[in-house]
Image: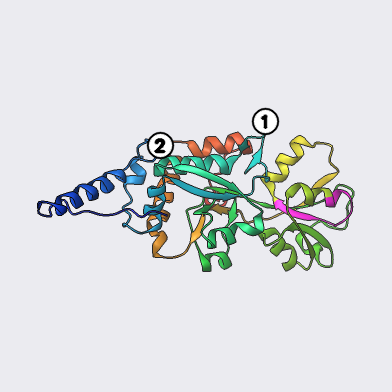
């Protein structure tokens, strides 16, 4: 990626080649002074965060885009509508963050088990995909402030009477995305977990009797049942503690200004009502505040 150069405007102006060098440096400096490749101007929340000439935020601004990894098949977070447009809560959150940074959002779809690897390799700048904040992930990644809260639900066939709690998963079988928090929870409770790619696949496996249960976000299961009201499924148990969704990025000084800029953007979206409005649009409720904090 291109790097933004810095130029000292108080250097003496000399003749000949020095004058030409200053002119070139001046052009480079003006090209990164708050205007993206599309000609849009950075918002105030982005300009409040100063980046160095070679950190990640500076490189993002230099290219004029931020590359965001997400699944694209996890409704209502990111999915394709009837016209095959990529839509969803995370899609619009990512687009609004890019707007605040003064760049375009380049949304790249990929399977869940490859999103973190894609960020590690530099394919994605950030991942916006309803990522749970866990101690293990915090050891390797820095996380933004939470931008939504959810609960984990245990889903079984509606005629299942053997599983009424998470503890009942001991010795049972479940299906979930490989490397997901839901896979980890199932294994912690003693279940044998089959790894699959999508929420729909996991629910079909439960309906078909291929596995005993699956775990997922309450919001995603609720959305599925809206469009599949006759599906023979039910919630057997719900986690007491809320899950915090936040935006991960590689840990370290290179991302310090990017992390601050993303948090500034989320704060602005929270204050102007954008986050709440998007939550109502896709979840049918405002999930941007942690209800347990007020109890």
Q: Do the residues labelled 1 and 2 touch (CB within 8 Å)?
A: no
Question: Could you tell me residue 178's position as x and y percent?
Answer: 71, 61
Question: Could you tell me residue 72's position as x and y percent?
Answer: 64, 45
Q: Which residue lies furthest to the top in this view?
A: 83
Which quarter shows the N terminus? bottom left
Left-right relation of 294 to 16: right
The magenta-colored residue range is 205-216
Question: Could you tell me residue 89's position as x and y percent?
Answer: 58, 41
- Indicate whether 151 appears above or below 173: above
Q: Which residue occupies 83% across, 57% down?
A: 163
- Indicate whether 24 appears above or below 115: above
Q: Which residue occupies 57% across, 44% down?
A: 90
Camera-nearest residue between 163 and 86: 86
| Residue that mark 1 sits on | 83
Instruction: Give the mark, 1 or 2, whose residue is nearer the N terminus.
Output: 2
Neighbourhood count class around disc 2 (C-alpha, 10 Å): few under 14, some 14–19, many 20 upward = few
Q: How many marks?
A: 2
Q: Which residue occupies 83% across, 45% down?
A: 233
Local SS, label 1: loop
Estimate the spatial distance between the alpha carbons at disc 1 and disc 2, rounded to whole Å. Answer: 26 Å
Question: Could you tell me residue 201's position as x and y percent?
Answer: 78, 49
- Indicate whether 168 appears above or below 282: below
| Residue that mark 2 sits on | 38
Left-right relation of 191 to 28: right
Left-right relation of 53 to 66: left
Left-right relation of 193 to 247: right
- Of tags 1 and 2, the one toward the viewer is 2
Neighbourhood count class around disc 1 (C-alpha, 10 Å): few under 14, some 14–19, many 20 upward = few
């Amino acid at each position: 990626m291109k790097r933004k150069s810095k130029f000292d405007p108080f250097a003496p102006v000399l003749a000949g080649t020095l004058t030409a060098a200053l002119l070139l440096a001046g052009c480079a400096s003006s090209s990164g002074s708050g205007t993206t490749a599309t000609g849009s101007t950075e918002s105030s929340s982005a300009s409040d965060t100063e980046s160095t000439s070679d950190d990640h935020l500076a490189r993002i601004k230099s290219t004029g885009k931020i590359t965001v990894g997400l699944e694209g098949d996890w409704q209502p977070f990111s999915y394709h509508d009837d016209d095959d447009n990529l839509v969803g809560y995370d899609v619009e959150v990512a687009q609004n963050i890019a707007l605040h940074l003064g760049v375009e959002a380049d949304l790249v779809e990929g399977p869940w088990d490859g999103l973190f690897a894609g960020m590690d390799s530099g394919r994605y700048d950030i991942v916006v995909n309803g990522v749970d904040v866990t101690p293990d992930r915090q050891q390797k990644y820095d996380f933004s402030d939470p931008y939504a809260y959810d609960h984990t639900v245990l889903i079984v066939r509606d005629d299942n009477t053997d599983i009424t709690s998470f503890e009942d998963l001991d010795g049972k079988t479940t299906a979930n995305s490989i490397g997901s928090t839901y896979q980890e929870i199932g294994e912690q409770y003693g279940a044998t977990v089959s790894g699959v790619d999508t929420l729909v696949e996991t629910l079909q496996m439960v309906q078909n009797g291929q596995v005993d249960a699956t775990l997922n976000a309450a919001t995603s299961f609720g959305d599925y049942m809206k469009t599949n009201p006759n599906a023979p499924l039910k919630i057997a148990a719900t986690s007491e503690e809320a899950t915090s969704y936040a935006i991960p990025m590689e840990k370290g000084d290179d991302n310090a200004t990017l992390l601050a800029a993303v948090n500034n953007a989320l704060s602005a979206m929270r204050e102007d009502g954008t986050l709440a409005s998007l939550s109502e649009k896709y979840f049918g409720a405002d999930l941007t505040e942690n209800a347990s904090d007020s109890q």
